[in-house]
Image (cartoon, rainbow, N blue to C red):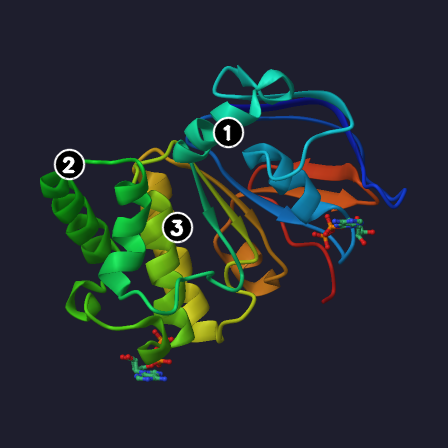
Amino acid sequence: MIEMEDVYKKYPNGVWAVNGISVQIKQGEFVYVVGPSGAGKSTFIKMMYREEKPTKGTIMINGINLSKLRTSKVPLLRRNIGVVFQDFKLLPKLTVYENVAFALEVIEEHPRNIKRRVLEVLDLVRLKHKARFLPSELSGGEQQRVSIARSIVNYPKIVIADEPTGNLDPDSSWGIMEIFEEINNRGTTVVMATHNREIVNTIRKRVIAIESGRIVRDENRGEYGYDS
Ligand code: ADP
Ligand code: ADP
């Protein structure tokens, strides 16, 4: 469960990116976050995994109050939240397998479990056959599938994605959405900021629209609602 109560975010330059957001997202929901550029979508989702701290208000993630979370406990929170970025953020010198295994090696998971889990998630994103490839040898869609595999290799309860299809062609984007749907069908909460109108209007889910740092619309099976 993700809960925000009257959350505000002011950046050091004086910009109020989030201006009083209260919201509840239940375990297992699939939520699109839409709105114009600069509306505060990224800031809204960055606060969920403590990449940014709120200036005011309360954020609870699975019962943990992020405002009270010590910096030393942030890695523990991140283990329960997978994050997927528009630009993949893969390590270029590591293979597909190694990129995914890295997250488990950091937490000193047993080598036998690492191999099993990495192959399991690579199978889920249909890239087991490219385990030995480097990111530069993959298409954009494939690189994003690796980054999704990496985000779920810890079996997090929540996956947060910031414009995951922003750099991809339509075909690859639909493939990425299939994977997110599958992850969601297994009970994982998915929160996705997106400008992809086609996808939002076709794969209907809850839509939270943000403008000027406020929620202006929140609908189940909602529409994208903007012209571009
Ligand atoms: P969106 O994701 O909807 O495009 P953002 O959350 O990135 O919106 O940005 C919201 C507002 O906060 C914008 O005015 C943006 O310029 C500003 N902003 C975002 N990140 C920072 C930052 N690190 N420092 C200062 N201002 C920022
Ligand atoms: P996707 O739809 O997954 O994005 P593409 O249609 O772009 O995939 O690519 C099709 C095939 O071409 C993929 O199997 C991929 O491995 C291969 N490919 C694409 N770009 C490269 C590259 N830069 N180097 C090697 N193989 C590539």
Crowd class of label 1 (few under 14; some 14 to 19; many from 20; radius 10 Å)? some
Taking the spot 17% from the left edge, 63% from the top edge, the residue there is 128
Q: How many marks?
A: 3
Decide if residue 60 is on the left or right side of residue 100.
right
- Which one is in front, 69 or 43? 69
Crowd class of label 3 (few under 14; some 14 to 19; many from 20; radius 10 Å)? many
Residue 2 versus residue 169 in the image, above or below: above
- Depth check, mark 2 against mark 3: the one in front is 2
Can you identify the residue that label 2 sits on? 110
**Mark 2 vs ligand 2: CB under 8 Å?**
no
Q: In the displayed orientation, state which residue is furthest to the right.
A: 14
Q: Amino acid at mark 1?
A: Val
Can you identify the residue that label 3 sits on? 180
- Which one is in front, 140 or 50? 50
Q: Name the N-terminal-most of marks 1 and 3.
A: 1
Query: Where in the image, quadrant-wise, is ligand 2 located?
Result: bottom left
Decide if residue 5 is on the left or right side of residue 95.
right
Q: Position of residue 191 (x, y in %)?
A: 52, 42
Can you identify the residue that label 1 sits on? 74
Helix, strand or loop for disc 1: helix
Q: CA distance from mark 1 to mark 2?
A: 22 Å
Q: Amino acid at mark 3?
A: Phe
Taking the spot 22% from the left edge, 56% from the top edge, the residue there is 122
Q: Position of residue 6 (x, y in %)?
A: 76, 22
Q: Are marks 1 and 2 in contact (CB under 8 Å)?
A: no
Q: Quadrant of the C terminus?
A: bottom right
